[in-house]
Amino acid sequence: MKIIDRNGRLFGKISVIDVLVIAVVLVMAAALYFKNNQAHTGAAVTEQAITFQVRARGIDSYVADAIRVGDGLYDQNYSSGGRALGKITNIEVESTPGTKLADELTDGTTAMFEAEDTVDLLLTVEGRGLVTGRSYSLNRVYDLGINSSRNYCTRQADFTGTVCRIVGAD
């Protein structure tokens, strides 16, 4: 029995062209697998400790009481890679009563006013991420920027805060 017959089939069963197509598909599948499963940031990039501060103004007292040192801080609206952005390491009460933005003033201006039973908090949070120049990415996916106002939460509290300071350590 010949390996390739007159019709171009291997062992009389399968075409040589079919074998070549199957081989090309297997090579392409292997290339896609290796491309998608290697580290996108390279082996030389390592995560560093990033400490940042979030200022939360006009937080109701019962919400402020629910925020604890050691709690994980999450962002309600943006993905952070399924992990907490970091752990709260310090909580400072900046002022009591806290200040809130006025909804509407009759002359068209805005102003901050003191609201009873509220506080202004400064939370210090320590997370891990990538630092490249002046760019900070927590958990490799969450971009952190000064003056960005976001809706944050812990397991017990939801609040709006503004990132006021970032320090890349290590």
Image (cartoon, rainbow, N blue to C red):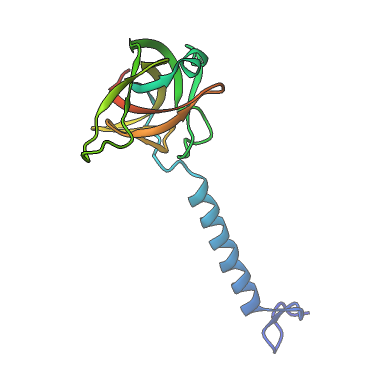
Query: x, y percentage for residue 112?
Result: 27, 26
Q: How many marks?
A: 0
Query: x, y percentage for residue 162?
Result: 33, 28
Query: x, y percentage for residue 100?
Result: 33, 25
Q: Quadrant of the C terminus?
A: top left
Instruction: Return the residue nearer the eye: 81 or 7.
Output: 81
Q: Is residue 118 visible?
A: yes
Q: Which residue is farthest front?
A: 106
Instruction: Return the residue nearer the eye: 38 or 27.
Output: 38
Q: In the rendered view, tell whether residue 154 sits above or below residue 19.
A: above
Determine the residue positioned at 55% across, 52% down: 33
In this picture, residue 140 sits left or right of residue 146: right
Q: Which residue is farthest right?
A: 1
Determine the residue positioned at 52% across, 15% down: 66
Q: Quadrant of the N terminus?
A: bottom right
In this picture, residue 12 sits left or right of residue 82: right
Determine the residue positioned at 24% across, 29% down: 111
Q: In the rendered view, tell whether residue 16 sits above or below residue 147.
A: below
Query: x, y percentage for residue 71?
Result: 51, 17
Q: Is residue 50 visible?
A: no
Determine the residue positioned at 27% across, 36% down: 105
Instruction: Return the residue nearer the eye: 156 or 58.
Output: 58
* Residue 144, quarter of picture: top left
Instruction: Return the residue nearer the eye: 16 or 95.
Output: 95
* Residue 39, quarter of picture: top left
